[in-house]
Amino acid sequence: MPPVDDLKVEAFQMFGRLAAKAGLAAETYVCGAEWIKHDQNQRQIVQRYDGRDSAAVVLKYVARPADTDGFTAMLGAHQAACDALDAIPAYTVPQILAADSEAQAYLMRFAKGDTFLDLCRQTDDHAPLLRRAGGWLAAFHGATVQGTRPFQPHFMVNHLQRLVARVESGQRRINGKQRFAAYVDRIADYAPQAQGHAGSIAAKHGDLNGLNLVMSVDETAAFDFSATTPSPVGYDIARLLQSYTQMAGDLDALPKGYAVPPAAWEAFFQGYTLVPPDDPTVQFLTRVQILTDWNRIQEHASLANVMRFERIKKIARQAFA
């Protein structure tokens, strides 16, 4: 595996190329912060460059995995979201200044503020932050809504059942496989209420977790889009609320039968007004998200993920009680 220092050198060279493409003087910028993912599956870097006389910009460079079609689609989704929220000052998507799909890199404006997750960890009162998160997502979905479509939960039920079959055959390794399989059996119990519900369809962020939402005093911004096709709005809601619950939520305030602490759920839906808090598709997909995260977290062995997995197991026990 190439060393991390090589990745930093590649990123610095990429910044110079994209800065020139964007009409920026690269020599007037210095790297002020960076975030790196470097393992057998991913090799990518995000850097903030601070300008001497200009606003800061952010470089994202993905060296691995190689998927130029997917990267191009992601750029398109980001730009479409930026255009959709162009007239809503409080809810934004940073403008892309230059991009190279073949090299899997882009340069965008820096969104000031702290991540939603960091802000939640800095205060005991998460309600204002959840309302703002709900507000951003409502603005994004509201600006891209395409009507309603009958919801078909059996697609997700079948997907999870196929996953269990792979685990039982030895094709897929997953920790706590017996409990996981039992929860998959239970997910079908939540499908009838959601079956055929006329759920709202809109553009999908695809990875709206607590680190991809940034808040300053007067602005909330999101980035790292990964979806390109319109989907039920419940997918993004479930992703964000489970990210919050797993990484910052008060699990002592999580009663049996709930996937998200009730106070957090209520606060989020004070900001998110496109569908009501009792929408059955959201209720169903929030539980699906628990099992999706249970499966995916196995792929990245780290202390943080071990701790998160313990929280996921506790959430699942309550949600499927």
Image (tube, rainbow, N blue to C red):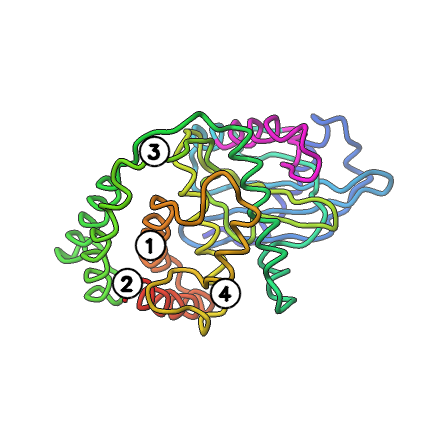
Mark before the other along the chain sequence, 3 or 2 = 3
Q: Amino acid at mark 1?
A: Arg
12 on left or right of 259: right
214 on left or right of 210: right
Q: Judge whether 140 appears above or below 50 on screen.
A: above
Is residue 7 visible in the rendered image? The answer is: no
Question: Which dot marks residue 198?
Answer: 3
Identify the residue position indicated by label 1 in the image: 287
Q: Amino acid at mark 2?
A: Phe
Image point (46%, 62%), residue name: 262
Instruction: Tell me if label 4 and label 2 are in contact, CB under 8 Å.
Output: no
Instruction: Tell me if label 2 and label 1 are in contact, CB under 8 Å.
Output: yes
Which quadrant of the view contains residue 156? top left
Residue 92 is one of the magenta-drawn residues: yes
Identify the residue position indicated by label 2 in the image: 320
Circle 1 SS class: helix
